[in-house]
Amino acid sequence: MNADTPNQFILNTEEQEMVDLLREEMGLESSAEVMHLLVRQAIQRIAITCPQCGHFARVTERDQAECRSCLSVITLSEDIWDATRTPAG
């Protein structure tokens, strides 16, 4: 493995056919581009975007998340994510 492809893995025949079909349908250059796109789509389903800094924040509880970049605590209220920064120190 080299630095450009740290996550190499083997797909079975059926999985590779699915990736090839997606690559052709999406007009992408490579299977790696398909995998990058799938990972980005998957993370959008389980993480939220921090309203303070725009980085992904990890949900820690049902209605709360924490941003590792700006250290905001993000809470869900009336279906809206709102961030408050934790005090430094």
Image (tube, grey):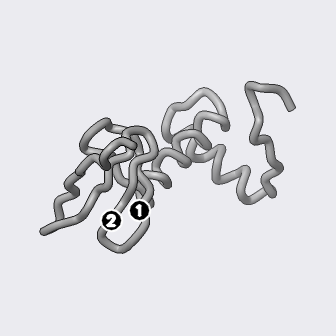
Please report the residue visible at 51 percent of the width from the left and 32 percent of the height from the top: 27
Relative to 70, is 77 above or below? below
- What is the x, y in percent for residue 23? 58, 39
Residue 59: image tag: 1
Which tag, 2 or 1, sits closer to the chain's start? 1
Task: Quickly name the residue at label 2.
Answer: 64
Q: Quadrant of the C terminus?
A: top left
Q: Identify the amino acid type marked 2.
A: Gln
Please report the residue visible at 41 percent of the width from the left and 45 percent of the height from the top: 56
Q: Identify the amino acid type marked 1.
A: Val
- What is the x, y in percent for residue 3? 77, 26
- Which quarter of the picture shows residue 28? top right
Relative to 45, is 27 above or below? above
- What is the x, y in percent for residue 26? 49, 38
Q: Residue furthest right?
A: 1
Please report the residue visible at 28 percent of the width from the left and 46 percent of the height from the top: 85
Which residue occupies the foreground of this view, 7 or 13? 7
Please report the residue visible at 37 percent of the width from the left and 39 percent of the height from the top: 70
Tag 2–tag 1 contact (CB < 8 Å) = yes
Q: Residues within 10 Å of mark 2 (few under 14, many from 20)?
A: some
Q: Residue furthest left?
A: 78
Q: Secondary structure at mark 2?
A: strand
Relative to 78, is 81 above or below? above
Left or right: 72 in relation to 32: left
Q: Secondary structure at mark 1?
A: strand
Q: Give how far apart the Cα atoms at labels 2 and 1 are.
A: 6 Å
